[in-house]
Amino acid sequence: MNIADSEIIVGHLASHGYSKVSDPATADVILLNTCAIREHAEERIVGRLTDLARLKATRPERLLGICGCMAQHHRDALTARVPALDLIVGPDGYRRLPALLAAAEENQGRREAVTDVRLDPDELYEDLAVARPDDAVRAWITVMRGCDKFCTFCVVPYVRGRERSLPAEAILAEVERVAASGMCEVVFLGQTVNAYHDGQASFADLLRRTAEVDGITRIRFTSPHPADMTPELIEVMGTVDAICPQLHLPVQSGSDAVLAAMDRGYTIAAYRDLVARIRTAVPGIALSTDIIVGFPGEEIPDFDATCQLLEEIGFDQAYLYKYSRRSLTKAARWEDPIPPEEKSRRLTHIIDLQEAIAAERNARWIGHEVEVLVEGPARRPPGHVVGKTAHFTTAVVPGPAEPGTLVTATITSATGHTLVATGPECAPGLSAATSGTRAAAD
């Protein structure tokens, strides 16, 4: 979502006379587009802003701004921590950036940042140009903005507003532009992407119509909410060939008590049943998930239940975090009795567990042929390229092959993170132009 918003920002500013440069030292304007999901991300952002402020010191007329969720979440504290900021713009203010930059230029010397953090329930950006990198091999397309779930740990509804969906026709027009540019893969984005509905088209309708666009052979979406996985959507996933056999399905915890405290809206029994129905409809589907450990009130039996669920489901990837308090959220008002060192212990344990699970699941691909969408040269071994399989697993295969090309190769070895094919050149598949476990510590 951050990448997609950045591409909107760059495209919109390009239509107003700006051009992108690769070196911040040569820029007249530096904008840092940000996330507010986790405390660790925010601390990294402040550190990066401090580094960029040194560039501004070498040329005071240079404009330094922060955009996105952190700008919305911590607008008052940001200028105190980074006095060099000229501009603070929330996720609904990108359309006004040209005028805001002009105002910031006029405002220089007053040391008061120009601020626009007004949430706009009607802002969809569907009419703004998108500037994707020349070497992009897949298109990130936002189909809905905001969130109505209000999970007790999550700040997103407060910094991105309520759910609203883009018109299906606008999305399909963008998909057609993507296909015409030579890309064969699209990824639909939304905080609860499967809640999409534009008043006429459901998310299942949108997927079905997207698959009819010539040149689009891979369709993905993220992140869905388990409560919005309708029978219609599952049926479409199982019958439309272009939809990749891969799904990110956040569970957050394996404990019903913790899920209730998180206000997730489902039980573990319901989640198990959902996974069973999805695997029946899409045999061999790769599943990934999000998990938070150390949530307020999580006892050892709750944590053990989460570990047991990981082993039972067998996720191909998992994004693992320890709980960090987010102001504005309901959970931020609760006592957080779990010591930081205990949160870290639980996180380390579950990372080790998932690493073993992912390695075992990836080993099943040894001896099997996979199709890989090439993203570029691999770091090693020499002469190999790297890309993603249809199951969204990273694969290193023999080259040469250009980015955006679909190639096939037989897997000879695997780790918990990567499939590897060695030997003769991989077989060329249809090029994009003609074909129409990762763990993170807080």
Image (tube, helix red, strand yellow):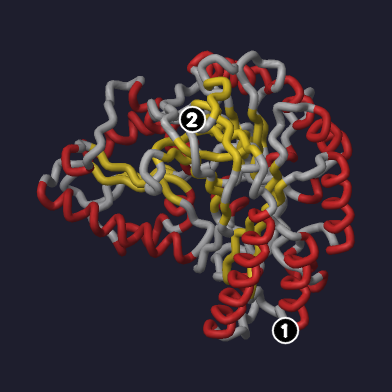
Q: Quadrant of residue 199?
A: top right
Q: Is residue 183 above or below residue 78?
A: above
Count neighbours of disc 1 (C-alpha within 10 A) and say few if under 14, some if 14 to 19, many if 20 or more: few
Q: Are marks 2 and 1 in contact (CB under 8 Å)?
A: no
Q: Residue furthest left?
A: 58
The residue positioned 59% from the left and 21% from the top of the image is 175
**Residue 6: horizontal and vertical position, in percent?**
43, 37
Amino acid under disc 1: Ile
Q: Is residue 12 visible?
A: yes
The residue positioned 13% from the left and 52% from the top of the image is 57
Lateral position of residue 64 relative to residue 364, left or right? left
In front here: 281 or 417?
Answer: 417
Using the image, tell me which numbered label, if any, was put on residue 137: 2
**Residue 230: horizontal and vertical position, in percent?**
85, 40
Q: Is residue 83 above or below residue 119?
A: below
Lateral position of residue 44 relative to residue 370, left or right? left
Count neighbours of disc 2 (C-alpha within 10 A) and say few if under 14, some if 14 to 19, many if 20 or more: many
Lateral position of residue 384 relative to residue 205, left or right? left
The residue positioned 55% from the left and 28% from the top of the image is 427
Q: Is residue 330 above or below residue 26?
A: below
Q: Residue furthest front?
A: 424
Q: Nearer the viewer, mark 2 or mark 1?
A: 2
Q: Counting residues from the N terminus, which is met first, the one under dot 2 or under dot 1? A: 2
Q: Which residue is label 1 attached to?
A: 300
Lateral position of residue 190 relative to residue 420, left or right? right
Amino acid under disc 2: Val
